[in-house]
Amino acid sequence: MLKWKIDKNVIFRLYYKNKNIINPWGIETADSSAFFSLEDGVGYRYEIEKEDYQIDDRSYKAGLTTQMKEGVWKLNIDDKLEENSVIRRVEVTTLEDSMFMDFVMRFRFKKELIEYAQIDNKIYYHNNTNIYHQYPVDSVYLQAKGFGINISVLDKIVPNTMEPVMYVRDNKDEWIVHVRMVPKEWDKEVIKICTAWAATRPLPQFISKPLLAIKYVKNALWYRGERAPFKNIVIRRFLNPAAFGMVKVPKGSNLMWHVKMEIV
């Protein structure tokens, strides 16, 4: 039977046969400037105006009203722990027109337990590439030592300007799986400086817009960190630019993920 520990507002540990198999899970989203993470102490440039949590051994419910730099929305969480699975449901309702770079349900698993990941009938081994192996699918499988892990989408609500995808990536000591909505149409293009010192700040639009009008620059920077991270350590540490599309989701819209993680 699975057991969990809720800490820092997220599923912090998940025990299978008395062994913790995960790093903290959570929910993430971003606009041009702000980055929201459900995990306490992570993220920047947003404010939680209201919050409520109800937690016990088998369920975790929460409601948060969040002010981003480019929007306001209400987040509702309803997670349940079953014998061999975790059922997660999260829904955002926009309280005003709001910009989104993506909307993510996040899963993380310890590298030493996982032999390989399978997505879209492709198998990946851990080589610390940090590349996003992203596809328009509804399930990801991880082969662990002595058991399997299946992450599958049960239901979703996706704005018509966004598309649902999943990805796996092999980063340092973990496998990361994201169930993700990303823009398929966008209202703004942004270049972000994706470094710790800059806290992923955007360049001003009067700089980003003309740069991204240059085809070579746009091709080089478009989702750069996800598909082909810079190998030059100086660039990666002090600049690390990447460009993203932002979509405006109208007031009163819903974004929802209902996902099952099952030990098989």
Image: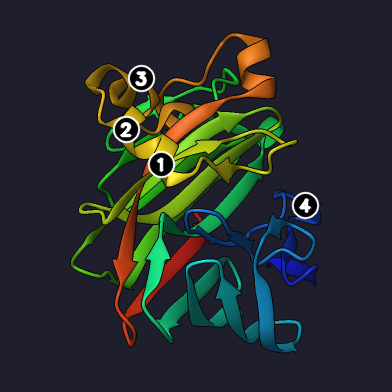
Amino acid, disc 3? Ala
Left or right of residue 19, residue 182 in this image? left
**Residue 94 marker:** none
**Residue 220 marker:** 3
Q: From this viewpoint, is residue 138 visible?
A: no
Sequence-earlier tag: 1 or 4: 4
CA distance separating discs 4 and 2: 48 Å
- x 66%, y 33%: residue: 195
Q: Nearer the viewer, mark 4 or mark 3?
A: 3
Sequence-earlier tag: 3 or 1: 1
Residue placed under numbered mark 1 in the picture: 206
Residue placed under numbered mark 4 in the picture: 20
On-image quarter of the N terminus? bottom right
Position of residue 30 measured from the top left corner of the image (x, y, whole percent): 51, 58
Q: Nearer the viewer, mark 1 or mark 4?
A: 1
Crowd class of label 4 (few under 14; some 14 to 19; many from 20; radius 10 Å): some
